[in-house]
Image (tube, helix red, strand yellow):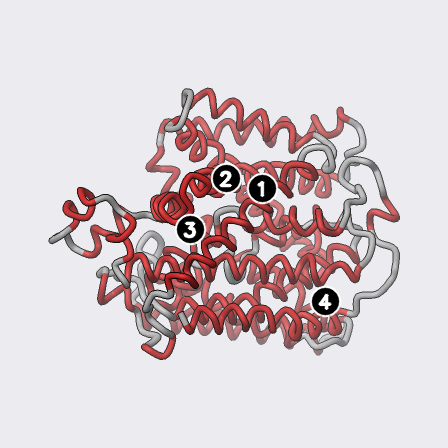
């Protein structure tokens, strides 16, 4: 519990100190914001700062800092360091600089910003890549919540239609009519759940593995996990440390802010808040698996069934959603069950809805189409939703096939984070500002995503050290390209 407490304090101090460093480096000022120049009542709509924070937090969080933190904690106390250091020096900086960069470019999306600073070829690739990611996320977050809801009441396909109808509304309606009203409620529920669980953790004060007990792969010893900490941990815990998915969501809020000075609490602050969520769930996972906390919260018949079983079977049975359900119900009672439902169902539904809306905005930017009329929004939303329906139908008919594809989504978000950090580094370099702020995490994330692509058994499956060597060469080449471009005249 000492590592948990220190980590929470470190995140708060990181927001107060390093958040101001990022703000000063970027140079937030009082210039007119996108909504003050282009208010249209649809996507450019003034919202109160507290509401923007709640929407931003829920958009970037979803279930990522919960499920990812639970699985990432299987590697041991090293998860604490990645969440804290990744959040302060990579994730929050990534979210802040990219969000502010969007504000400086009239609320442009990540693909357009990539084109401005990395070239037209990079923009086209990012449009395709981001569109694919948004529609995969949207489709995935229709079917999974529908399965959970059907287990409570109703029919699975009934919930599929209801959830998809909600997606249509969030994609087409003005941002203040659906997202602006519903998302803050869900965000408040998630925050309440995390605070309540954190209070129970403090009250229980269990003896848990600490950072100084060793940063080796505890999962290899206890659960027989074959993946090494590097790069697997840094892909498993994405949203709780750094995630490129956030760069696709921030432009929606950049179009609703009335001052650049709101950027630090909204962009940097939302990421720090997400890091706290991840820390709580990583600590719960440590308690659940390393301190045999599962015995305390499970029924006697379940405990008896797993006595004598392998530890690997334990984590296979108690997957992340199951841990959330059991912990919330046993620690928080009836209220906990409701909160678990909101966390497991509402969060992915809201993330899916935002993903389809983002896909519409990406198409609008790529085709230079204004979105003020219903007709123009329908023109772009219909193909996006049609592809979503096709992916959904494929998922229902081939669930295992889609699961294989979904493994690459986590990698895709980290690859997008690396690209976004390079974009931010080029911008800061051109503005003669401290580009090291984003260059260091850009280099690290490039190494992570290249190495994971090479070493993963579902892709190239190279041995550990050869993959590390190739990843290092690719990363050094990217660094060389950056400094060569920096010296070249514009």
- Dot 3 falls on a residue whose secondary structure is helix
The label nearer to you, 1 versus 4, is: 1
The label nearer to you, 1 versus 3, is: 1
Q: Earlier in the sequence, mark 1 or mark 2?
A: 1
Badge 1: few (under 14), some or many (20 or more) residues near its Cα, within 10 Å? many
Given residues 434 and 299, the one toward you in this image is 299
Q: Earlier in the sequence, mark 1 or mark 3?
A: 3
Q: Earlier in the sequence, mark 1 or mark 4?
A: 1
As drawn, which residue projects farthest toward the left?
Answer: 308
Q: Earlier in the sequence, mark 3 or mark 2?
A: 3
Decide: marks 2, 4 in contact (CB < 8 A)?
no
Decide: marks 1, 2 in contact (CB < 8 A)?
yes
Residue denoted by label 4: 427
> Does the rendering let one see residue 414?
no
- Dot 4 falls on a residue whose secondary structure is helix
Badge 3: few (under 14), some or many (20 or more) residues near its Cα, within 10 Å? many
Q: Disc 2 and disc 4: Cα gap in Å?
A: 39 Å
Q: Disc 3 and disc 2: Cα gap in Å?
A: 14 Å
Residue 297: horizontal and vertical position, in percent? 29, 49
Residue denoted by label 3: 67
Query: Quarter of the image containing the N terminus?
Result: bottom left
Q: Earlier in the sequence, mark 3 or mark 4?
A: 3
Question: Would you say 347 lies left or right of 263 here?
Answer: left
Specify the label residue 342 is tagged with: 2
Question: Would you say 184 lies left or right of 375 here?
Answer: left
Residue denoted by label 1: 186
Q: Disc 1 and disc 4: Cα gap in Å?
A: 35 Å
The label nearer to you, 3 versus 2, is: 2
Q: Residue at x 69, y 55 (%)?
A: 115
């Amino acid at each position: 519990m000492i590592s948990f407490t220190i980590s929470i304090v470190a995140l708060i101090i990181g927001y107060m100190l390093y958040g101001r460093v990022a703000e000063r480096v970027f140079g937030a000022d009082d210039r007119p914001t996108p909504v003050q120049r282009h208010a249209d009542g649809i996507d450019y709509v003034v919202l109160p700062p507290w509401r923007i924070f709640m929407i931003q937090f829920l958009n970037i969080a979803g279930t990522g800092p919960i499920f990812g933190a639970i699985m990432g904690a299987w590697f041991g106390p090293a998860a604490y360091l990645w969440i804290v250091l990744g959040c302060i020096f990579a994730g929050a900086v990534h979210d802040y600089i990219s969000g502010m960069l969007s504000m400086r470019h009239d609320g442009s999306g990540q693909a357009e910003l990539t084109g401005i600073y990395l070239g037209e070829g990079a923009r086209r690739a990012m449009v395709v890549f981001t569109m694919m990611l948004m529609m995969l996320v949207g489709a995935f977050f229709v079917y999974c919540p529908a399965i959970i809801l059907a287990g409570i009441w109703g029919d699975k396909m009934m919930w599929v239609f209801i959830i998809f109808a909600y997606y249509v509304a969030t994609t087409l309606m003005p941002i203040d009519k659906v997202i602006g009203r519903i998302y803050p409620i869900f965000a408040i529920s998630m925050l309440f759940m995390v605070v309540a669980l954190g209070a129970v953790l403090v009250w229980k004060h269990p003896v848990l593995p600490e950072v100084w007990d060793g940063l080796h792969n505890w999962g290899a010893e206890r659960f027989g996990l074959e993946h090494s900490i590097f790069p697997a941990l840094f892909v498993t815990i994405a949203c709780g440390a750094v995630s490129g998915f956030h760069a696709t969501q921030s432009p929606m809020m950049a179009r609703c802010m009335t001052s650049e000075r709101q950027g630090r609490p909204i962009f940097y602050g939302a990421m720090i808040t997400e890091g706290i969520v991840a820390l709580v769930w990583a600590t719960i996972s440590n308690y659940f698996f390393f301190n045999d906390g599962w015995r305390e919260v499970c029924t006697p018949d379940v405990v008896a069934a797993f006595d004598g079983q392998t530890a690997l079977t334990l984590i296979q049975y108690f997957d992340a959603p199951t841990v959330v359900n059991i912990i919330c119900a046993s620690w928080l009672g009836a209220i906990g069950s409701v909160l678990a439902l909101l966390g497991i169902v509402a969060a992915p539904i809201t993330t899916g809805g935002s993903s389809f809306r983002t896909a519409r905005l990406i198409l609008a930017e790529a085709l230079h189409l204004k979105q003020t009329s219903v007709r123009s929004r329908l023109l772009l939303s219909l193909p996006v939703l049609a592809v979503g329906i096709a992916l959904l139908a494929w998922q229902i008919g081939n669930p295992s096939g889609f699961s294989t594809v979904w493994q690459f989504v986590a990698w895709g978000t980290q690859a997008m984070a690396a690209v976004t950090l390079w974009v931010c580094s080029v911008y800061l370099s051109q503005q003669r500002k401290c580009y090291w702020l984003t260059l260091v995490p850009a280099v690290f994330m490039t190494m992570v995503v290249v190495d994971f692509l090479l070493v993963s058994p579902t892709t190239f499956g190279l041995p550990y050290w050869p993959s590390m060597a190739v990843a290092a060469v690719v990363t050094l080449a990217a660094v060389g390209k950056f400094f060569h471009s920096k010296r070249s005249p514009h």
